[in-house]
Amino acid sequence: MNSRSPQAGGCLLFLAILVGLVVGLNKGLTGPGLIYGAIAGIILAVGFYLFDRRQRH
């Protein structure tokens, strides 16, 4: 059993959504800002997961 605990990438998703919201508010387009932020956060979280998984094996 591996003693190294996995890292959490959910904070990246949350922060990307918040950044997308702020950018969207500044441009007057909150909907697309949230969507783009969510997409970017999902990509970052999946990438972080794959990187952490590769490090554990």
Image: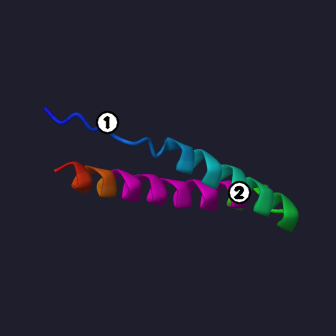
Q: Nearer the viewer, mark 1 or mark 2?
A: 1
Q: Name the kind of residue labelled 2 in the image.
A: Val
Q: Residue at x 54, y 61 (%)?
A: 40
- 52 or 17, nearer to the observer: 52
Left or right: 22 as drawn, with respect to 37:
right
Residue furthest out toward the front: 3
Of pointers 1 and 2, the one earlier in the residue sequence: 1
Q: Residue at x 84, y 58 (%)?
A: 25
- 35 or 7, nearer to the observer: 7
Q: Look at the picture and state if 14 lies above or below 33.
A: above
Q: Is residue 30 magenta?
A: no
Q: Main secondary structure of the magenta part?
A: helix
- Picture coordinates of residue 20, whole percent (x, y): 69, 58
Q: Which residues are magenta?
A: 33-49
Write down the residue under mark 1.
5
- Picture coordinates of residue 38, whole percent (x, y): 58, 53
**Which of the 4 image quarters holds residue 1?**
top left
- 49 or 36, nearer to the observer: 49
Q: Please, what secondary structure does the residue beneath circle 1 have? A: loop
Q: CA distance from mark 1 to mark 2?
A: 28 Å
Write down the residue under mark 2.
19
Left or right: 55 as drawn, with respect to 43:
left
Q: Residue at x 27, y 38 (%)?
A: 4
Q: Look at the picture and state if 37 lies above or below 4.
A: below
Q: Is residue 39 magenta?
A: yes
Q: Please, what secondary structure does the residue beneath circle 2 have? A: helix
Task: Please rate how many residues cluster around mark 1, counting C-alpha atoms within 10 Å: few if below 14, some from 14 to 19, many from 20.
Answer: few
**Which of the 4 image quarters holds residue 37?**
bottom right
